[in-house]
Image (cartoon, rainbow, N blue to C red):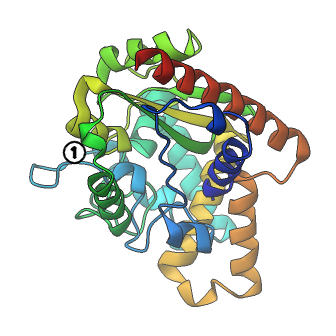
Amino acid sequence: MEGYCGSAAQLSLLQSELVDSLGGSVGILLIHALNAHGFAWDRRVTAEGCDLNRNFVDFTKPLPENPGYDELADHLVPSDLSAESLAVAERAIAEFRATRGETAFQTARKKGQYSRPECMFFGGERPSEPRQVLEKICMDYRVAERQNVIIIDYHTGLGPYGYGELQTETSSGLEGYHRAVEIFGPSVTSPDLGTSSSVAITGTQDEFWQRELGSRHTYVCLEFGTFSPDKGREVLRNDHWLFAYHPDQANTEIGKRIRNATREHYNPERPDWQEMVLSRCDQVHRQALAALTQAK
């Protein structure tokens, strides 16, 4: 679903004059629709059922724990979407939010979990196929040999409507944050500083780049807001309910209704949102290429 935004950003870049103005030592590597399965089925997850942006952990080590998610899992994706069942789930979620606080709730829900394949934000049991594809692409193009790499990872669904927030991740730490600020300015945010609209999450793509390049890379997640977080929670709940308990209905009327709602949440087909996305992407592309040109 987030691939629509990323595709538009890449096409806009290719059609701009920026590509023609590159110096000989600067290159652009575009990776399109890495999670092709999710793109095809209007989902966030891969064919293995994992959230790709939670899948980049080191699977040779003990997996991160998320006890808050374990406590809420059956309420976040109940097996029954009847009014009575949803009322029970919402009461449990409301109690968790009231007693633990909003940050604790969002962390429990979004941080990443590695024990419930049928539920949202599952990080997988092993490296997924899309992760392996990314690793192979980077090996083929010898990205690890580059002296200065800037990664722009396009996402949607979090933050104010249409606003493109440049988020850094905890795997790069404050050093990675400061590198991003040098390039993109003080609008860059960090979960370590509490300025990001995202909580700290595990297994992000930046963990891969940190392992490969260390301080030679600058990673930013360009996150475009759409609608309210609770609306996002609803569409993801319905999506996971459909594919966990009724996958045979994915192409029926109810399945298409759920899939369409998910796609609309992450890719609003509205001219104002689309214009905001392309304008911000153009700005970020220019900043990134200017930094690479100056650094050569």
Quarter the C terminus occupies: top left
Rendered location of residue 193, percent (x, y): 41, 13
Mark yes or no: residue 286 visible. Answer: yes
- The residue identified by callout 1 is 64
* Left/right of residue 48 with respect to residue 241 in the rendered view: left
Residue 158 screen position, x and y as percent:
62, 38
Horizontal placement of 289 versus 122: left or right?
right
Figure check: 284 above or below 277:
above
Decide which of 246, 199 is in the foreground and name it.
199
Nearer-the-camera pick, 64 or 51? 51
Residue at the (29%, 57%) spot, across then down: 140
Determine whether, in the image, residue 28 is placed left or right of residue 117: right
Q: Quadrant of the N terminus?
A: bottom right
Q: Choose top left, top right, bottom left or bottom right for residue 222.
A: top right
Which residue is the extreme one toward the front?
Answer: 24
Q: Nearer the viewer, residue 285 or 81?
A: 285
State whether residue 195 appears in this view. no
The image shows residue 78, relative to residue 106, as above or below, that is below
x, y percentage for residue 121? 42, 54
Q: Mark 1 Cα within 10 Å, few/some/many (few <14, many 20+)? A: some
**In this picture, residue 60 sits left or right of residue 31:** left
